[in-house]
Image (spheres, rainbow, N blue to C red):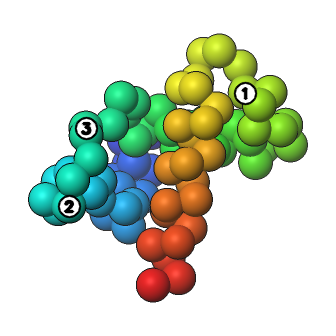
Amino acid sequence: MTDAEWAEVRSPMPVPAWLLKRGGRPEAYCHREILDAVRYLVDNGVKWMALPVDFPYWRAVYDFFRRWRACDRA
């Protein structure tokens, strides 16, 4: 992902709960890496559990995607 693409996408991404003082802990992965993993999934049509090891753990990517999708509906 280019820096210009990241600048466009960064603002609508969900804010972690710990930054909003709602508990939780800091996330272990960079949002940019997680978004790259989601783009890989969409582009290649693979299953969540089949993400290559170059990306963050599949469950972290899936949980972030679910949060982002729920944030869009609110």
Q: Residue at x 39, y 60 (%)?
A: 13
Q: CA distance from mark 1 to mark 2?
A: 30 Å
Q: CA distance from mark 1 to mark 3?
A: 23 Å
Q: Residue at x 53, y 37 (%)?
A: 60
Residue 30 image position (x, y, % from top left): 37, 33
> Is residue 57 placed above or below 31 in the rendered structure?
above
> Is residue 53 placed above or below 73 in the rendered structure?
above
Residue 31 image position (x, y, % from top left): 40, 41
Which is nearer the N-term, disc 1 or disc 3? Answer: 3
Which residue is label 1 attached to?
51
Q: Nearer the viewer, mark 1 or mark 3?
A: 3
Q: Secondary structure at mark 2?
A: loop
Q: Nearer the viewer, mark 3 or mark 2?
A: 2
Which residue is label 3 attached to?
26
Which residue is label 2 attached to?
22
Kind of residue sitting beneath label 2: Arg
Foreground: 33 or 61? Answer: 61
Which is nearer the N-term, disc 1 or disc 2? Answer: 2
